[in-house]
């Protein structure tokens, strides 16, 4: 039996029970839609974490008794460390000016304060190509042991929390995706079961007159394929429209400008559609084997 014949029979059956088939496709679409929204959230959160991490650097505070002639040597030592892209020396006077600019209208509280109360420091930018949180921790631990160093800061608590939260969202996305994909497959399978029950006499007659297994179950598999394909495609289309809407808001909003919202990577998009189609077809095939004993 050729594929065009199977498709013609499947489209004929779809027209015969259009309302039920439409509702099934909508349920599949809603299931995939929820999962796709979670996936979009996860990838943008992950991108934000990676961007925040790549911009993360080390601030190395020196001790008060560090001689000035030791500064060039420390600069060379820091610049020569693996993974260090840029080193900037911040004197006590420059740090004091930064503090004044930060306080702006309230900088009068610094009147009479000696700029020397702020220790000199080095700001270290890590090479983005090799960025790793564990490497930053290791590097901070190594530098902190130097005799001229009083303290090393790099925002460990914030980056740790971001990575933990990102991992938590990833687990939610995976669990939600599995549950919703099986929900979609369950709905399609049960719709096919109801169709089989309604046409059981017709199918039995077809078997008696010598119809092959593929001739009987082929159109049902095509229906399941179409429902999985249309449902998941519709869901991803809605998510893409929402993504473009967010892009428009991002372009107009000063608060969101530079966030660079991204869409779900194309290979994940293909995987979502393929998984939806595969589960719907497999569920239908199992249902047909059980109820028709093929």
Image (cartoon, rainbow, N blue to C red):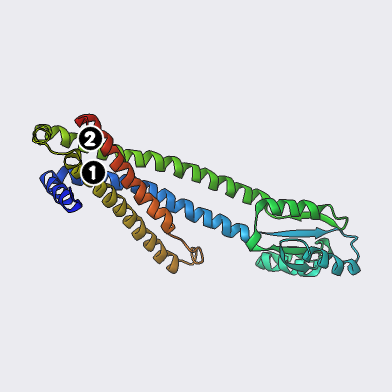
Q: Residue at x 57, y 57 (%)?
A: 50
Which of 119/210 is in front? Answer: 210
Kindly identify which residue carries mark 2: 288
* For residue 112, side relative to residue 36 (left or right): right
Q: Quadrant of residue 19?
A: top left
Give how far across and how far down residue 48 sits, in percent: 54, 57
Task: Check if mark 2's residue and mark 1's residue have beta carbons within 8 Å.
Answer: yes
Of the numbered discs 2 and 1, the one sitting upstream in the chain is 1
Give how far across and how far down residue 222 sits, in percent: 22, 47
Give how far across and how far down residue 201 sits, in percent: 9, 32
Q: Residue at x 52, y 57 (%)?
A: 47
Which of 271/23 is in front? Answer: 271
Q: Which mark is residue 221?
A: 1
* For residue 104, side relative to residue 211 (left or right): right
Give how far across and how far down residue 45 sits, in percent: 51, 53
Q: Is residue 114 visible?
A: no
Compared to residue 197, the image places residue 275 above or below, namely below
Q: Residue at x 18, y 34 (%)?
A: 194
Q: Residues within 10 Å of mark 1 (few under 14, many from 20)?
A: many
Badge 2 marks a residue whose secondary structure is helix
Whole-number angstrom distance, CA of label 2 to CA of label 1: 9 Å
Q: Is residue 244 visible?
A: yes
* For residue 237, side relative to residue 66 (left or right): left
Q: Quadrant of the C terminus?
A: top left
Badge 1 marks a residue whose secondary structure is helix
* For residue 60, side relative to residue 6 (left or right): right
């Amino acid at each position: 039996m050729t594929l065009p014949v199977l498709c013609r029979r499947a489209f004929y059956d779809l027209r015969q029970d259009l309302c039920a088939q439409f509702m099934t496709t909508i349920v599949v679409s809603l299931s995939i839609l929820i999962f796709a929204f979670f996936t979009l959230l996860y990838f943008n959160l992950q991108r934000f974490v990676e961007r925040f991490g790549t911009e993360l650097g080390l601030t190395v505070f020196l001790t008060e008794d560090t001689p000035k002639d030791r500064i060039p040597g420390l600069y060379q030592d820091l610049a020569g460390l693996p993974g260090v892209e840029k080193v900037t020396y911040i004197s006590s006077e420059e740090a004091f000016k930064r503090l004044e600019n930060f306080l702006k209208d309230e900088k009068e509280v610094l009147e009479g304060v000696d700029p020397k109360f702020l220790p000199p420091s080095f700001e270290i930018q890590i090479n983005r190509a090799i960025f790793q949180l564990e490497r930053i921790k290791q590097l901070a631990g190594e530098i902190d042991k130097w005799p001229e160093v009083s303290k090393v800061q790099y925002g460990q608590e914030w980056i740790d929390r971001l990575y933990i939260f990102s991992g938590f969202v990833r687990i939610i996305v995976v669990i939600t995706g599995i549950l919703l994909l099986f929900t979609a497959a369950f709905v399609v399978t049960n719709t096919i079961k109801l169709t089989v029950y309604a046409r059981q006499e017709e199918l039995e007659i077809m078997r008696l007159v010598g119809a092959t297994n593929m001739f009987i179950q082929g159109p049902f598999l095509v229906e399941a394929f179409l429902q999985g394909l249309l449902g998941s495609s519709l869901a991803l289309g809605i998510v893409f429209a929402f993504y473009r809407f967010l892009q428009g808001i991002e372009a107009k909003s000063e608060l969101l400008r530079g966030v660079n919202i991204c869409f779900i990577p194309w290979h994940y998009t293909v995987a979502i559609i393929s998984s939806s189609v595969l589960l719907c077809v497999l569920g239908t095939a199992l249902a047909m084997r059980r109820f028709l004993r093929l």
